[in-house]
Image: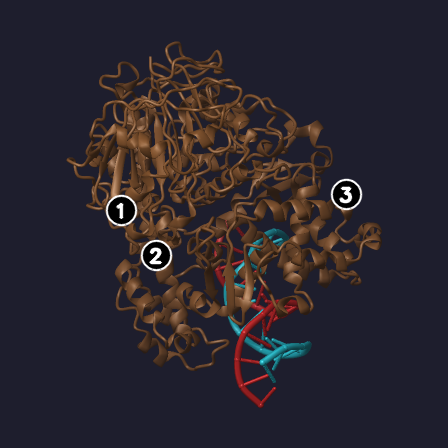
Chain colours: A brown, B cyan, C red
DNA sequence: CGCTCCCGCCACGGA
DNA sequence: TCCGTGGCGGGAGCG
């Protein structure tokens, strides 16, 4: 896709040229990271095998040299078992005590890797679609498959983003290495970067403690502060101005002087609260860690949030006092790539290209939280970021198809303009295809506190998006706007969100797209969309860059038709709404994770894989016709408690095409049709949504007439909703989930529900037993309410005073022992624009919904 | 051909 | 001395 190119000027003066910028996504670059290449993969049929046989491999493997094993290429290939099962086997085998030994053998690694890949794909977030294909097709692990970025994703997938405070997760480097099928050396690369951001800390030899992202905002804040102190910004400016001769190391100097590295190093330690890192601190600090922090600082102090590698390298070199020499520069750049890959996996940055006279230069754009300074805002942003990241990947994966996008100019930094998010958004449909999208992140709710920003984002409205939001990540306002979102922080529930739109309803303020026919076709789209959405948890951001953007979900379009960006754009522009609509946000709670594996699961399902793509494509084409509607997509993402296996689910909501119109029943078009929750969750489950709210408060003009958006927690919104729980409809999960209407959805991707195999981890499919609720067991509204209100983050909490209650239209809940499924009919209303109905949320929840007509 | 960056040699330093 | 760490850069994959 698209590449966006920025000019140096832009970087320097963001404001000015924003329009001009073209930033490329890194697509290329990223692509590499992306999971798979289908193409590449030869279609070999895999030899599946027993691949796992470690034993064999061992045999082959020459030695035992632990450290650097000899690789056997051949073996690998042979071994690759792409079957999931095989993978499991491997894992299991690996798990054994011997592991280490085995590790050593390369053979193992390789196979394992493969396995992992498959594994991941299917299960994990990242995975995204490719997986499916991969599984079958993959053959050899291409270089990309072995990339640090991918590896990092796999690594991250193993642990919850926001682990419960109670849970302490320790990471055994050896185990991780084995399970991921890589040498330990690689794990160090990842861990060192994560450690620099305090996501992990060294506990003991070979052992790291996983902290998750809870303290990330704090860490970033600290880094930002430091970066400011160091005047990195100035340095960057100088370098950039200079045009950057590559080699001017000197420029940087000045700053250097003032600030000794030592300070930086201190940084490292800085916030760490808890973990005694004992020795860790002592040593020289590892440059990778320091470099990582410095690199992050550069972004945090940068106005544009885009840093070219060469500038970063120069600055870092300077600081390090080294004499600048070219080789040093090269080495530095190499290291920066390593760091960047990890940061990309964390969804903090994304690759872009800056174009200057000389040509394009590789650069990275910060897509992480910007505002963390204040308090909570970072949080949401973060989420968004994640989504973005994934999205990118997806894109990459998908390849180009995606949107080409990008052309649009969006201002890079957020701050500036408020404007326009919309158009840009347009997005491409291709997204849909992406598998990546699958990934879901879980976010913890924790701290969500303030999210003003988000609100704005969602709503677009207001706030400048500036800050964080502004970033691309932030979102695609437009999209968001159009959709109603629900943000639920409850512990178990991560996210939800969706959009709705119904054909008819759509409103839009801005113009929305009227285009979309509400037709049934929509559903199809939905299906497609869903996938993506699912993946994206955080989709908000990106409006601008589409490509990157995470949001991908949204775009449904397909290439053929929509094809071109242009076309697409136009369409979309009209309103952003339409097609893209979908977004999700999600959050996941920590708990899940454990399942890390599980996590993304649902979404991820294999479907996404290549195959799915195909289907998607097809669909898309179909869709096109019908539309881009956004259908409503709403998803809820729930993390499952451990028991479930990490079952997280997201269900798409839409069911009826018509929804919009008349809701027959209750379900309006959009809503979120279902949610699957682990029963335990209910208690805490904070929110829900209500479609019905009568009026839109803020929503803007755009709002459809009938509908009112509901706002939760938003202060401004003010409206209070009532919590209503409608009569329940019990829905069979299946049905709900898979709307009959859309067969398509089901198929492949729908949200990950795919029937196919979930993956080792056990993703739950809607249909699957796990998911399914018993009909009988529907929960009564009351129950629900109960759950909602009191519990943890009850509404009250959420809303606080501001939003005391929420109205819910109808909810049906079913429970099985393990799972509860709730259905929420939502009205399809769209919000539009900025004002649109989005609501933000407050701290905890946000939601915007619309009512039904 | 140039950008990326995997791979793994090898050194450092604690136990 | 062993081994965990991780700096470093050759060179290969890929677009």
In the image, is residue A562 above or below residue A762?
above
Q: Pinpoint residue A518: horizontal percent, then vertical percent.
A: 31, 18
Query: Which of disc 1 and disc 3 is earlier in sequence?
Result: 3
**Chain hosting mark 1:** A
Q: Which residue is mark 1?
A: A764
Residue situated in front as seen by the camera: A724 or C2 = A724
Marks 3 & 1, CB-CB < 8 Å contact: no
Q: Pinpoint residue A420: horizontal percent, then vertical percent.
A: 57, 22
Image quadrant assignment for residue A463: top right
Q: Is residue A372 visible?
A: yes
Marks 1 & 2, CB-CB < 8 Å contact: no
Residue situated in front as seen by the camera: A312 or A384 = A384
The residue that appears at 59% across and 22% down in the rendered structure is: A419
The residue that appears at 36% across and 14% down in the rendered structure is: A505
Where disc 1 sits, the SS reads: loop
Q: Please tell me whether mark 2 or mark 3 is closer to you in this view.
A: 2
**Chain hosting mark 2:** A
Q: Which residue is mark 3?
A: A243
The residue that appears at 26% across and 17% down in the rendered structure is: A663
Where disc 3 sits, the SS reads: loop
Q: How many marks?
A: 3
Count residues near mark 1 (Cα–Cα under 10 Å), then give few for <14, some for 14-19, many for 20+.
many
Count residues near mark 2 (Cα–Cα under 10 Å), then give few for <14, some for 14-19, many for 20+.
many
Q: Please tell me whether mark 1 or mark 2 is closer to you in this view.
A: 1
Distance Cα–Cα, label 3 vs label 1: 53 Å
- On the rendered structure, is A120 left or right of A570? left
Q: Pinpoint residue A323: horizontal percent, then vertical percent.
A: 80, 63
Q: Which residue is mark 2?
A: A119
Q: Residue furthest left?
A: A776
Query: Which of disc 2 and disc 1 is earlier in sequence?
Result: 2
Q: Same subunit under labels 3 and 1?
A: yes
In the image, is residue A425 above or below residue A57?
above
């Amino acid at each position: 896709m698209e590449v966006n190119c920025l000019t140096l000027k832009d970087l320097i003066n963001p404001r000015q040229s924003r329009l001009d910028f073209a930033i490329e996504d890194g697509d290329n670059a990223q692509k590499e990271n992306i999971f798979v290449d289908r193409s590449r993969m030869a279609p070999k049929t895999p030899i599946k095998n027993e691949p796992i046989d470690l034993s064999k491999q061992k045999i082959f493997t020459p030695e035992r040299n632990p450290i650097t094993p000899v690789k056997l290429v051949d073996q690998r290939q042979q071994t690759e078992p792409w079957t999931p099962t095989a993978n499991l086997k491997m894992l299991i085998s690996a798990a054994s005590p011997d592991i280490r030994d085995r590790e050593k053998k390369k053979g193992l690694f390789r196979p394992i890797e493969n396995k992992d890949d498959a594994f991941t794909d299917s299960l994990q977030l990242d995975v995204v679609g490719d997986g499916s294909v991969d599984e079958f097709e993959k053959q050899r692990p291409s270089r990309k498959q072995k990339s640090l970025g991918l590896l990092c994703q796999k690594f991250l997938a193993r642990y919850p983003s926001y682990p419960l405070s109670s849970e302490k997760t320790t990471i055994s480097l050896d185990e991780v290495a084995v399970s991921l099928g890589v040498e330990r050396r690689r794990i160090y690369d990842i861990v060192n970067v994560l450690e620099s951001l305090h996501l992990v800390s060294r506990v003991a030899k070979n052992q790291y403690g996983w902290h998750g992202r809870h303290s990330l905002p704090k860490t970033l804040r600290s880094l930002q502060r430091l970066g400011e102190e160091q005047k990195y910004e100035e340095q960057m400016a100088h370098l950039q101005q200079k045009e950057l001769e590559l080699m001017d190391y000197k420029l940087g100097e000045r700053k250097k002087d003032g600030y000794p590295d030592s300070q930086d190093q201190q940084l490292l330690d800085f916030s760490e609260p808890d973990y005694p890192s004992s020795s860790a601190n002592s040593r020289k600090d590892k440059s990778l860690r320091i470099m990582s922090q410095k690199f992050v600082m550069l972004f945090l102090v940068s106005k544009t949030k885009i840093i070219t590698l060469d500038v970063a390298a120069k600055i870092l070199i300077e600081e390090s006092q080294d004499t600048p020499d070219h080789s040093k520069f090269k080495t530095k750049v190499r290291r920066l790539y390593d760091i960047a890959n990890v940061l990309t996996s964390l969804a903090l940055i994304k690759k872009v290209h800056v174009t200057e006279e000389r040509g394009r230069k590789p650069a990275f754009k910060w897509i992480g939280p910007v505002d963390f300074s204040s308090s909570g805002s970072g949080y949401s942003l973060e989420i968004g970021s994640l989504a973005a990241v994934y999205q990118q990947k997806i894109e990459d994966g998908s390849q180009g198809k995606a949107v080409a996008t990008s052309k649009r100019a969006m201002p890079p930094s957020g701050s500036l303009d408020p404007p326009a998010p919309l158009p840009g958004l347009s997005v491409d449909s291709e997204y849909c295809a992406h598998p990546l999208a699958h990934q879901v992140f879980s976010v913890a709710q924790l701290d969500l506190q303030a999210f003003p920003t988000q609100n704005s984002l969602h709503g677009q409205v207001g706030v400048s998006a500036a800050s964080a939001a502004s970033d691309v990540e932030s979102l695609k306002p437009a999209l968001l706007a159009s959709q109603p979102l629900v943000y639920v922080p409850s512990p178990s529930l991560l996210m939800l969100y969706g959009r709705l739109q119904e054909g008819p309803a759509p409103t839009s303020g801005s113009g929305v797209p009227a285009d979309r026919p509400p037709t049934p076709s929509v559903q199809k789209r939905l299906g497609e969309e869903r996938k993506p959405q699912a993946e994206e948890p955080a989709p908000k951001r990106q409006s601008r860059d589409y490509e990157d953007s995470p949001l991908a979900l949204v775009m449904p379009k397909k290439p053929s038709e929509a094809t071109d960006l242009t076309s697409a754009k136009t369409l979309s522009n009209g309103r952003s709404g339409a097609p893209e609509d979908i977004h999700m946000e999600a959050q996941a709670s920590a708990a899940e994770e454990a399942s890390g594996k599980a996590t993304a699961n649902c979404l991820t399902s294999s479907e996404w894989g290549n195959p799915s793509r195909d289907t998607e494509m097809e669909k898309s084409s179909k869709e096109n016709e019908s539309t881009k509607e956004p259908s409503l997509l709403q998803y809820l993402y729930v993390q499952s408690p451990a028991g479930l296996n990490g079952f997280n689910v997201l269900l798409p909501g839409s069911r009826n095409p018509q929804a919009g119109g008349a809701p027959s029943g209750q379900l309006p078009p959009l809503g979120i049709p279902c949610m699957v929750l682990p029963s335990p969750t209910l208690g805490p489950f904070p929110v829900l949504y209500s479609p019905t709210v009568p009026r839109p408060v803020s929503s803007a003009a755009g709002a459809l007439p009938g509908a009112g958006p509901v706002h939760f927690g938003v202060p401004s919104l003010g409206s209070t909703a009532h919590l209503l729980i409608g009569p329940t409809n019990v829905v069979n999960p299946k049905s709900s989930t898979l709307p009959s209407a859309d067969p398509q959805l089901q198929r492949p991707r729908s949200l990950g529900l795919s029937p196919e195999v979930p993956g080792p981890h056990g993703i739950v499919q809607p249909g699957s037993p796990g998911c399914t609720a018993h009909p009988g067991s529907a929960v009564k509204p009351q129950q629900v309410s109960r759950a909602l209100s009191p519990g943890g983050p009850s509404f009250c909490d959420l809303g606080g005073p501001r939003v005391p209650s929420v109205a819910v239209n109808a909810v049906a809940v079913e429970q099985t022992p393990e799972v509860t499924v709730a259905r929420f009919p939502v009205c399809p209303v769209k919000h539009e624009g900025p004002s649109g109905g989005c609501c933000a949320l407050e701290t905890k929840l946000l939601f915007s919904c619309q009512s039904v007509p």
